[in-house]
Structures are given as structure tokens and as C-alpha cells.
Image (cartoon, rainbow, N blue to C red):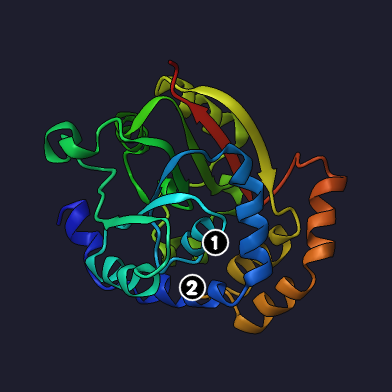
Amino acid sequence: MTATDRFHESDPTGFITLERFAAATRFNRWMFNTIRPYCKGHVLEVGSGIGNISELFLEHGFSLTASDLRDTYCEYLRKRLGQLPGLKDVISVDLEAPYITTQCPQLLGQFDTVVALNVIEHIENDGLALANCWQLLKPGGNLVMLVPAYQALYNKFDEELGHFRRYSARTQRLLLRQSGYEVAHQQYFNLAGIFGWMVNGQLLKKRLIPRKQLMLFDKLMPVIRLADILSFRAFGLSTIAIGRKPL
């Protein structure tokens, strides 16, 4: 089975997780506002899922091309976002495509920003994924990359969501540099989330993030955000890096 075949199958765990996070509106806005300063011009969001962050890009006036590998998600995105101003297109993009230059020539060098939030960890050949993002970016464009942090935290949640790995700031930075990017910014994100991830995924072996816990987490967002500020964003459940394609 190819990677494309695997990703076009049904995704019940992923879909339920995305639906639960759709209700975590404070968390989604926090994530969006964290990456927003590094997004410019025409944005390609890869792995848009059901549009939880896509909608925020459009709400804030960005020109957005949303994308996903699964046809079912692309259709969902067209229905959810199709009438919103700023949406340029909804397309299917495979970051693991070995010959993206010939498979998607119309997309090469078309985007000022490529956003990959919780996407690269799903791709076995992450170096190829970053090389394909490079091909899609204009010179001087930014790759906004958020991935789960710390391999030691890999647990049942990661397995169910189809994660191949987790990253440290060092391994994320090294991957970007090996792929030719300049690292313009890096930080950890969501320190408080580590506790819930460990308890539910490692100790209790749960398959899904509990809905009630996620809603409580969302209500406590002022405290959650404060934890990141007080820790100087030196630790977190995720790590964010901005890779810049040189001019």
C-alpha cells in the first residue's frame, strides 16, 4: 500500500480528534496567533483537515489555498469554506510525492507561506516533505512547521493518529537546515499540555483525547498561555519553527 492509498482511507480517529478540537476555539486562536506573525501573502495550508485553522486565516484577511491529502477532507473544506472571501482554492497535495515538480507544476513557486501544523510527523520521509514544501514556496517565503515534541512522549495517541515520530527543537532545526532552509524563529508551544498527554496516552492508554478534559483545558486558556510565558517557551508539547527559503 502506498502512502497516498493509506491517507485516502477513512480516518475515524483523526476526524473525531479534529471535531473535538473544533470546539476548542480558544486553543485554536492561541495556535493561530502564535504563527500569524510569520505568515504573509498567499498562504498554502497543507493538511487543513476540517478547517479549524483555515477559517481563522480567512477571518483575518489572508489569501488562502487550503489542502489535504484525503478527498473526503477536501470536500468538507469546500463546503465549510467555499463562501468565505479570501479562499483561493481547495486542492489535494501529497508532500510525500517523489516527483512533485512534474505532478504539480502549476503549484511550484506560487506561495509566500506554506503552513504545516501537525502534518510532518505523519510522513515517513520527512526530508522529502520539506523538499516539496521548498518547491512550492517563492524565494524568501516561509515554511511554518509545528510538530509534536519529545520522542519520550510518544504513546498511544501518537500511534492512533499515525505519527511516525516526535521532534526536539534540535532535530527539527537540523531537518530544516539539511533541507536548505534558514531557521528564522523557533520555540516550544503548550507546556501545560504535556501533563494531559502523558496521563491519558501513556498511563491510561486512551485512544482519543477526552472531550471533557479538552473543554476544561480550553476554558483554562489564560493559565495555559501564562505557563508558556513564564517558561520562556523553552518546553512544550509541540515545537514550532519558521524555515525561510533564501532569496
Up the image or down, 27 lies above or below 181; here it is below
Q: In the image shown, does 137 or 118 lie closer to the viewer? A: 137
Q: Which residue is mark 2?
A: 17
Q: In the image shown, does 3 or 229 lie closer to the viewer? A: 229
Q: Quadrant of residue 24?
A: bottom right
Check the picture and name the quadrant holding the C terminus. top left
Tell me the amino acid under the disc marked 1. Answer: Glu
Q: Which residue is mark 1?
A: 59
Q: Quadrant of residue 21?
A: bottom right
Residue 174: x and y in percent read 51, 25
How crowded pointer 1 is (Cα within 10 Å; few <14, some 14-19, many 20+) is rated as few
Q: In the image shown, does 151 or 112 lie closer to the viewer? A: 112
Check the picture and name the quadrant holding the N terminus. bottom left
Q: In the image shown, does 228 or 121 lie closer to the viewer? A: 228
Residue 11 in view here: yes
Residue 98 in view here: no
Outermost right residue: 230
Up the image or down, 171 lies above or below 60; here it is above
How crowded pointer 2 is (Cα within 10 Å; few <14, some 14-19, many 20+) is rated as some
> In this rendering, would 114 be left or right of 131?
right
**What residue appears at the point 68 percent right and 79 percent down from the top-left corner?**
215
Tell me the amino acid under the disc marked 2. Answer: Thr
Up the image or down, 102 lies above or below 49; here it is above
**What residue appears at the point 82 percent right and 64 percent down from the top-left corner?**
222
Outermost bottom residue: 212
**What residue appears at the point 19 percent right and 36 percent down from the top-left corner?**
100
Residue 19: x and y in percent read 48, 77
Outermost top residue: 247
Outermost front residue: 85
> In this rendering, would 32 be left or right of 162?
right
Residue 244: x and y in percent read 49, 25
Q: Callout 2: helix, strand or loop?
A: helix
